[in-house]
Image (spheres, rainbow, N blue to C red):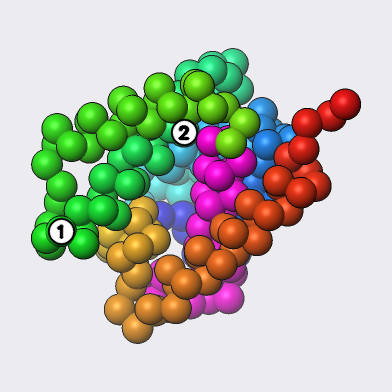
Amino acid sequence: MLPTSYELPAALLLLLGGTVACFAGYRLFRIVLAIYGFILGAMLASSMMGVSNTTGMIVAALAGGIAGALVLVFAYFIGIALVGAGLGALLAHAGWTYVRPGEPPALAVIALAILGAIGAMMLQRYVIVVATAFGGAWTMIVGGLAAMGDRGAARAAAAGDVWILYPLTPAPGQRWVPVAWVGLGLLGLGVQLAITGRKRR
């Protein structure tokens, strides 16, 4: 978790990055990959530093973010396969919650992740549009909540609660989040299919 003085700028960057991904993800896919690679790399690298070591955490976040962005940008096709695998894993988790509580079997997650990766390579354009619309929508919601100083979001982020990663399992008292996520994702999907994600002639 970032030091308090850096939380608002980070939240605004999440909100901006989510907006770009949601509404122009296909057209700017390499930029979106760089944004999400930076976020993932920064999260992983900064989590290895002690909370009291602010300078070390910031340096690690920047170095990890740059490394993550470079990896995803240069691994364009791997990035598409990873997007498909991530969608497959999300579907496994979302579908399993309707069958029984708890985590889905590992084999089901792995199988759907593999199918998602194969499907993503076969239907690249549509997978990119759907993934960036809904991934961007979720990033916008998390960034917006953090920017508004939502204490529930801050507590959940600090505690590592599951709702941060899984939109279909929101924090207590925030049952509106999945509805907003789906609505915003569908809006982004419509904008991309109609305007920003159309193939150039």
How would you rate the neighbour count of disc 1 (Cα within 10 Å): few for under 14, some for 14-19, many for 20 or more? few
> Which residue is rendered at x = 47% and y = 72% of the image?
179
Give the answer, above or below, for where 21 lies relative to 99: above
The residue most toward the right is 201
The residue most toward the bottom is 173
Label 1 is placed on what type of residue?
Val
Residue 154 x %, y %: 41, 69
Judged from the image, the secondary structure of the residue bearing numbered disc 1 is helix
Q: Is residue 30 magenta?
A: no
Residue 181 x %, y %: 50, 64
Give the answer, above or below, for where 62 lies relative to 138: above
92 left or right of 81 in image: left
Looking at the rendering, the stretch of residues picked out in magenta corresponds to: 127-155
Residue at label 1? 99
**Residue 30 placement: quadrant:** top right
Label 2 is placed on what type of residue?
Val
Q: Is residue 59 visible?
A: no
159 left or right of 60 in image: left
Residue at label 2? 83
Residue 120 x %, y %: 48, 28
Which quadrant of the figure contains the N terminus? bottom left
Decide which of 56, 25 is in the foreground and name it.
25
How would you rate the neighbour count of disc 2 (Cα within 10 Å): few for under 14, some for 14-19, many for 20 or more? many
